[in-house]
Each structure stands twice: as structure tokens, then as C-alpha cells.
Image (cartoon, helix red, strand yellow):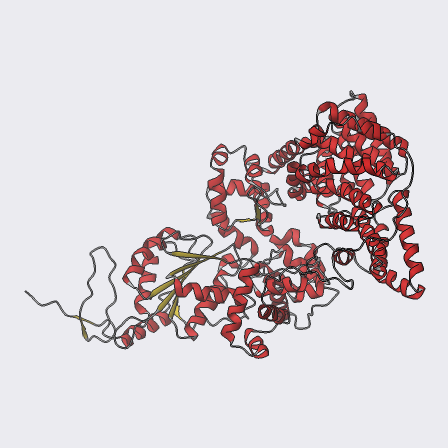
Amino acid sequence: MSASPTVGCDMCGRPVRPHRQSRTSPPRARYCSNACRQRSYRMRQKSGGMDTALVETPLTQMSSFIGRTDELIDLARILRESRLLTLTGPAGVGKTRLAMELAGQEARGRRHEVAVVKLGQLTESEEIRQRILTTVDALPGGADGTEKDRLLLLDDCEHVLDTCGTLLTGLLPRHPRLRILVTSREPLRLPGESVFPVIELALPDLDSGTALAACLRSDAVTLFMDRARAVAPDFKLTEANAADVGAICARLDGVPLPIEMAARLMRVFPPDEVRDRMDDRLALLTNGWRLADGRHRSLRASLGWGYDLLSTAERALLRRLSVLPGGFGPDAAAALAADIPEAVSAMPEILIGLEAKSVITPVPGDDGPARFRLLESMRHFGHEMLVAQGEDTAAYERLTAWLVTASLPLREEAVAPAGTLRMLEKEHANLTHALRRLRSGDDERQLLLAAALAAAEVAGGRHTGAAEHVAHALDHTAPTSDYRGVALEAAATLARREGENAAAARRADEAVALERERGGGTARLGRLLLLRGTILRLADEREASRADLAGALNIGLRLGHTMLTALCLGEIARQQMENGELGSAEQTIRRVLPALRRHAAPFRRRSVLVTAGALALEKDDLTVAEAHFTEVLRVRPAHRSDTAAAIEGLALVATRARRFDRGLRLLGAAERIRDNAGRDTEWWRRRVHEAREATLRAMPPARAETWLDAGRGLPEQQAISLALGDDGPGTHHKRPAHPLSRRERDVAELVVEGLTNRQIAARIHVSVRTVETHIRHIRTTLGLRSRAHIAAWVAQRQPKPPALLTTPPAEQRMPPVRSVVHGARVLGRANPRQLNDT
């Protein structure tokens, strides 16, 4: 046999043995030693022949690295366990910077020899193959000829996934000590690939505490301030501008690239002006780094790069989804894409594809249907494309029609189903958006959508401006509209919630009269009579209230509608109790409360629970009374009138148990809430007044006023915490176990102070590795992603309410008010089986 031909080293010419390679593989460079390989690599780099580099040049970053400490710990662990790790995420979220930081960390620790290949400007498959293979060959090996641990970072792979996937499938088996780190907007979907989604930076919770304190705990704000001070050294975060800075970061979804662009505007514009111009962000944020890739020089270019990589159907759906600022489910997406048959039939696949490409994000929540959202910047870009394509008018029409269909049960059902109310709660932002679009005309559908927004507001316990939308719809639509009755009902409900009983009664009268004109005896009339009867009871118009409740109950019984019947009986039980018929009231409550707990939306059972608590007080059963009033406060969200009544009820429990300091603080807290919640019935006011006077007589005046003032100074949430808490002597209740160990709590509290792992280790006298372990356990236990999330959780966490108090009964019972209720005879005609068989 002939000897193998001898070839020369490509660097020094010394003879080397040729590599074995297939005919189809590209030619590989030949070197006699590792030193020649590295020398050749440096020469190619200096000559500009390749966009790759070893660790010295690309991994030395010019700007500071903010946040992501915990992500780096996780990624280092995953990199030790996986040979192919892909960082995914939306445009500008910081995938490249995080990958560079990880690669630099590995290089500094001498765990890997590192090289980087930037693929953003490459499109030709053969060029990409040559670039990657040459870089892998150029990575140094061991001094003894063995292969060292090597790390190759492939940056921006989303546009060449197939090429990279094919190459890596053959490359990784041939190099057992090679690891690949990839950044891409979607995974490679290769065997053995570990995917790490890079999420947005932690945002400040501007609704908890002061804006400045919330911003100081936010990584997004920290990044904003760092980049702002780079161009405006005198810029500071203050109480005056903290809310504006926090709002800017929130409007930009915590995504680093647009946050950095917005921060650099601080040299020219104040924060409040930048915040006000966020709706025009695509034109505003154009100040990326001068030498950055083209797609990173402006927010529009960054979003456009990803948009161009989508399929035709994905782009069309994205444009239509831009009319949904409040998120969406598959049903809403299908409704908006009704004009694209191929998209409707393949909706699950398209949504999965958009999520994989980091265009839409799943919304975490309960066990309900899947729900997604567009980052706000992507939504603005999609809307710009929607208008450019002339598709906006049709898209908004489909949105309005879908919301109208979803809201129809409000008009057609005797009691809006709990499922409909939950759905409307989730769609409240989309309802508001659609109503703003309809305001310029007299479209009668705005009556129904405004009523739906009001129902979502009442059920969710939030204020979304529904009252203004309802009033506008009533003033600007035809009085003969079929939807007018449901809008009048919504106006009455909102007025009653705000304690405006006169306005509520007037709107309820209009709604009842309109319904009777169209033919009485309907389920809708029963619902309206129940509403008006409740309003009249609060106004102490008992005879009129009894008549309306009797009419509503008769309709409920005739139609066999269990929930309408139960709600009517709940109101009648209140009147029975106030008239001294405690036995009848108790029988009614026992009949209806289980049905309401099983089937009614949470907000519907609060008033019945208040009645049950008041009834237990009348019977001097303080334990049961406390249980019912506590349940009212735990049914979230609560409305102010129910909250005030429950706190007053717990104050009465405390005073009868001779815990006067607690009782006075609760009474003071309830006074403050009552100022914004309207008044209750005269019967209840008298009970509260008697308890207050008895307590004031039992304590020194100065001390009593001190306790009252302390309660009046409490915000609503603190008042609820006081009402649910155990601050009295002589009780020994076991509080719920804390989810963290004692040492983990110590570490978490030090994280709040902003200490590094090394500083925490020195403070509690453990190793840095132990602190890292504790932080990983904390994040795993609490389901958090970053140190900022841990700090926010610790700072905002309220103590859990204790178990129900067991208090001795009072020595004497308050005398009941003696009177006769006509509604008792109506109550006797109710069929208990209709409730029990629900």
C-alpha cells in the first residue's frame, strides 16, 4: 500500500497528516499545532475576513449589565447539563446581551474556550456553514492534543433556523466537548435542546406604597436610570418623577431596548412628556446605538425584522389582534380572523407559531381558557400595519360584533351567568377600547357594551370609567333601542354602588317602566324589580321595597329560575330580620346561602353574608357572626358598602366581647370607608350607633378618641387587614405556615435591602454558594423569576388572616326591633326544592 500523502501546515508549512473527510464536506484547514491554529485565527480576524472573535473582543461590553443575576445562575447550571441551549424572547428583550454576559462569565472562569459567530447579516447557507465550521476549528484545544471544553455562541439565528439546525445536528456528535449557546426569537426544535425564555425586566408595582419605593425595587427602572444618567448626569429619580418613570417602563413592557432608547431622551425631554408620547413610540424611539445592527437602531426596525419573518397568515392575524389591548383568547382571535378562512381553520397552529416566535405571550392566570397578549410595542406596530393595509375598519367591526354577542346574556337572562361575568371581566380593556371607537356616532350597540363594561366593573370591584360610558350611550342613542333597558339598569347599579340612591331609583324606575311597556312578566322585569327593591330598602322605603321584591320573587318562581329566586329571598330575609322575625329570616338564609355559594358570582353573595352576620349578632352568636363578616371581606374583590358593613359587624362582635380598643379602631376605619360608600338602612345604623356609644361609655374619653382616630387614619386595605387580623389579648391562634424557612426569610429580607450575594453571605456568615442555593429555593417555592420579584414579594406581602376568633358570648343581647313584614307571606310560597336541587 502506498503511504498517505503528506501535506503542509497552512500556517508554517510543516508536514501534517491530512484530515479524513467526506467528499461532500467543505475543505477544512490544516495545522501542525494548536499555536498555529490560534495564530491563523488572529490573522483572519485582523484582516476582517470573518465576523467571529474569541472572548477578548466581543464579550467586553461597553455598557453596564443590569439585573438578570438569577438568570445567569440558572443559565450556568443549564449549560453544565445541556450541550445546546437556546435563549428565546421578543425583539429587544436582551437575549444577545444576556448570552454575551454568560459566555464572558464562562470564559473568565476558564470553564470554556469561547467564540462568537454573529449571524444577523448572513443569509447564504454555505457562508454560514463555513463561518461556523472555521470558528469551531479555530477554538484552542488542549496542550496534549486532547479537546478542551468549548463554547460557541451563535447570535441571531431566527432567520436561518434550518441551516443552523442541519449543521448543529452533525457538528455536536463529532465534538463531544463542544457546547452551543444560541439566541433566537424561536427555538431550533432539535433533540436535546434546552430552551430558556428571556422575559422582560421586573416592573414597579405603582399601586403598592409610594411610586419611588416601588421604582427602587424594579430592574426596569434601574436600567432606565443607568442609561439616563449616561446622557444626563444630573438626572435623578425623585418622588415627583418616579410615577412617570415607572409608567414609561410599564408602557414599554419592561423590554430593555426601548427602555434604553426612552432613557436617552431624558437629555431633551422630561419624563412626563415622554410618558404622554408613548402612543407615538414608533416615531419617538429612533435613537439606538449608532454602530448597532440596523434592526437595533430604532424600535420600528426591531419590530419590523421579526414581522418580516412571519408567514402571511401570521402577519394577517397579528394585524387584526392589534385591536385588542386587553389580551385575547382563541375565540376572539378566530372572530377577528373570520375573513381569512385558512387562518380560522388553523388557529391553534398559528397561535402556537406566534408564541414560539415571541410575538404573543401566554397570560398566566386561573384554570380557565388559554389567553394571550401582545406586548404593547408590538401591538402598536401591528396596528400601524393594519391601518397601512386598510383593514382597520373591518377589524373593529368584527371586534364590536364579537363583544356584542358575548354580552347578550346581560339582556336575555334573569341573572347574568357567572361565566359571562368572568369573561367580561377579562375583556374590560377591549370593551373600553371598542366603546371609545363608537363614541363618535349613535350606534345603539354602545348601550349594550357600556352595560357589559359596568357589569365587569361591578363583578370585578374595579373602577374602569363605566359610568361615563353608560351616561354617554344613554345620551347619544335612540330612546327606542332594544338595548336601552340594560343600560338604564347598569346606570342604576353603578349609582347604587356609589351611594347615590336617588339617582339609582330614578334610573331603575325608567328601566322598569320601559320593560313593562314592552310586555311585563319577563325574566328581565324580575331582575329589574329585584334591583329597585334593593335600592328602595337602602332608602328605607319599606312598603315599596316589599312590593318590588314580592313581584320579582313571583316571576322567579313562575319561571323556575333558581338564582333569581334565591337573590329575592336573600333580600326578603334582610327585611324579616329587621322586622324582628329572626326565625323566618334564619330559615330563609339557610335555604338560599348554599345555592348562592355554589352557583352565584362572588359579588352576589356578599349582601346575603352581611345579612347572615347581622342575624347571628341578633342571636348573640358571636362566633357565627364573625365567620360570616370575615367571609364577606375574603370574597374578593369587595365593594365599599359591603366592606364597610362587614367591618362594622366585626366591630360589633369586638365590642360585645369587651374588646373595646379593637372595636373602636374598626368603627373608625368603617367611618372613613362609609364616606365614599353611601349609607346603610336606619336599622343597621342604629345598631352601630348603640355599639359605639356603649364603647365610649366604657373607656376614658381621651383613649377612646385616640382609638377612633387611629382607625380613621387607616387606608381601606389596612382596615381590611386589621379586621381580618388578630390583635387582641388572650387569643392563641396558629397562623398559617410561612412558605419560606427562617433562613430563607432572612436572605429574602436582605435581598430587599439591595445586597449582593457576597454581602448577604458576609451578613449571615455563610458561603456565597449557600446564598445562591437559598435564592434558588426561594424563587422555586414562590414561582418568581428574579431578585427584583423577590424584593417586591417581600415588601408587598401582607400577613395572612388568622383563623376565626372564638369569643365568649356577650352577657346581654341587643333587643330586636319589633314589627311585622308582609313579605313573610310571600316567602311561604317559595319551593325549597327549587333551591336544593340546583
Q: Nearer the viewer, residue 662 or 235?
A: 662
Q: Nearer the viewer, residue 532 or 207?
A: 532
Residue with the most extreme front position: 811
Q: Is residue 275 above or below residue 468?
A: below
Res. 392 image quadrant: top right
Which residue does the image show at 86% across and 32% down from the upper left?
Answer: 545
- Choose between 348 and 607: the one closer to the eye: 607
Q: Quadrant of residue 546?
A: top right
Kindly identify the residue that appears in the image at 36 percent across and 53 percent down: 191
Q: Indicate whether 386 appears above or below 288.
A: above
- Kindly indicate the quadrant of the structure image that contains residue 135: bottom left
**In the picture, which quadrant includes the N terminus?**
bottom left
The answer to whether any part of residue 439 appears in the image is no
Residue at the far left: name it.
Answer: 1
Residue 23 percent across, percent down from the top left: 20, 56
Estimate the x, y position of residue 87 in percent, counting from the top left: 46, 58
Q: At x 67% / y 59%, what residue is drawn? A: 205
Left or right of 548 in this view: 44: left
Which quarter shows the C terminus? top right
Q: Is 756 left or right of 428, judged from the image as shown?
A: left
Left or right, 436 with respect to 150, comes to right
Residue 184 appearing in the image: yes
Residue shown at 49% from the left, 73% from the top: 769
In this rendering, the count of numbered labels is: 0
**Vertical order, 754 against 168 (above or below):** below
Rendering coords of residue 686 (x, y %): 91, 47
